[in-house]
C-alpha cells in the first residue's frame, strides 16, 4: 500500500486466467432483478449462459407458423441485454420439460394463457398471504 501511495497510481485490475459465466436467471420476479442480473453479468463475467428450459416451440416451428409473442419477447430481451463481446452458451431443455411447463405454468386457473412470470408472481403472493396472513 505504501508503494501505491508513493506511485500515485491505482492498483491494476486482477487478471483472470479463465472465463467466467452466469445464467441471467433473476433472483426475483421483477424487471429490476432482471436488469440487475444482466448488469452484473456485463460487469463480472465473460460468458452468458442462456437456458431455454421451456424447449423449442416445435408445433409452431414445424408448421412454419408464428411463435407466441411471449416467446419472441423473451428472445428479444435476452438478445438486447446480452453484453457485447460476451461468449454465449445456449442450453435448450427437452420436450418433456416443455410439457411440464405447459401443464403447470402457462394457463391460469381459468384456462387463460398468461405470461409465466405473472403466474409465478401470483403464486408467490398466495404463498406470502398463506404464511403471513397479509
Image (cartoon, helix red, strand yellow):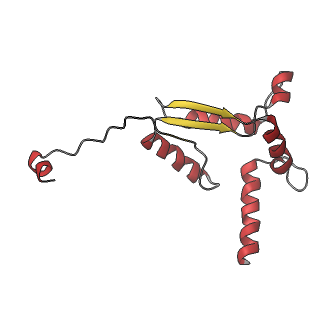
Residue shown at 36% from the left, 38% from the top: 16
Q: Position of residue 121 (x, y in %)?
A: 72, 58
Q: Position of residue 98 (x, y in %)?
A: 80, 39
Q: Most extreme residue toward the right, as rendered? A: 110
Residue shown at 76% from the left, 73% from the top: 130
Q: Count the numbered circles shown.
A: 0
Residue 15 is left or right of residue 83, and the answer is left
Residue shown at 83% from the left, 50% from the top: 104
Q: Most extreme residue toward the bottom, as rendered? A: 133
Residue 130 is left or right of residue 42, and the answer is right
The image quarter containing residue 27 is bottom right
Q: Position of residue 126 (x, y in %)?
A: 77, 67
Depicted 129 relative to depicted 61: above or below: below
Residue shown at 22% from the left, 45% from the top: 11
Q: Position of residue 75 (x, y in %)?
A: 66, 34
Depicted 7 relative to depicted 85: above or below: below
Residue 127 is left or right of residue 78, and the answer is right
* Quadrant where the image shows the C terminus: bottom right
Amino acid at each position: 500500500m505504501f508503494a501505491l501511495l508513493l506511485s500515485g497510481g491505482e492498483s491494476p485490475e486482477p487478471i483472470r486466467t479463465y472465463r467466467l459465466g452466469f445464467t441471467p436467471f433473476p433472483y426475483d420476479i421483477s424487471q429490476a432483478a432482471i436488469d440487475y442480473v444482466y448488469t452484473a453479468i456485463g460487469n463480472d463475467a465473460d460468458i452468458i449462459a442462456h437456458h431455454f428450459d421451456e424447449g423449442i416451440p416445435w408445433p409452431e416451428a414445424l408448421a412454419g407458423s408464428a411463435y407466441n409473442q411471449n416467446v419472441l419477447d423473451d428472445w428479444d430481451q435476452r438478445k438486447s441485454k446480452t453484453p457485447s463481446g460476451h461468449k454465449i452458451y445456449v442450453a435448450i431443455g427437452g420436450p418433456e420439460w416443455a410439457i411440464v411447463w405447459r401443464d403447470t405454468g402457462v394457463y391460469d386457473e381459468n384456462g387463460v394463457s398468461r405470461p409465466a412470470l405473472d403466474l409465478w408472481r401470483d403464486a408467490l403472493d398466495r404463498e406470502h398471504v398463506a404464511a403471513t396472513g397479509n
